[in-house]
Image: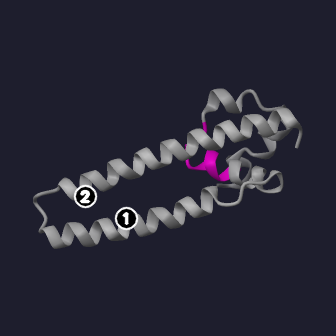
Amino acid sequence: MNESDWKIFKQIKENAIEQFCSLCLAEFREAIDDESEHVHSRYLLNYKLVENRNKQMSLLFDGHSRSKAWIQLIAIRGEGLADEELVSKLTDEFREKTDPARHKW
């Protein structure tokens, strides 16, 4: 991976983490605020949501290295979390290598 792709990947990943966390917080807030459910049910649901999202976050973002960047970018793009404007700045080779459709993501 060349230096310019690495720098862009780091920006894409940082933005994707921010977007992922914002989506999670909105989901948690919705579960917490649903007063049609009993408070204990909301607590249990929120616990499960946090647990599941934490696993997903780990799969998407853990391990920051050049050797893992391509697989992370496939996952980030596959989840719709990549800033496509930044993706368009990647070299053609890296962009094509990390196309989630190519890997049936």
Quadrant position of the N terminus in the picture:
top right
Mark 2 vs 1: CB contact within 8 A? yes
17 displayed left or right of 52: right
Residue 60 in the image, given as x and y percentages of width and height: 61, 57
State the residue at coordinates (31%, 56%): 28
In which quarter of the view is residue 47 placed?
A: bottom left
Residue 75 in the image, given as x and y percentages of width and height: 64, 53
Q: What stretch is highlighted in magenta?
A: 74-82
**Type of residue at label 2?**
Ala
State the residue at coordinates (55%, 47%): 17
Which label sits on residue 62? Answer: none
Which label sits on residue 31? Answer: 2
63 displayed left or right of 6: left
What's the coloring here?
Answer: one colour
Q: Which of marks 2 and 1 is nearer the N terminus?
A: 2
State the residue at coordinates (75%, 27%): 89
Give the spatial CA distance, label 2 vs label 1.
9 Å
- Is the residue marked by circle 1 packed among few (<14), some (14-19), or many (20+) residues within 10 Å? some
- Which residue is tagged 1? 49
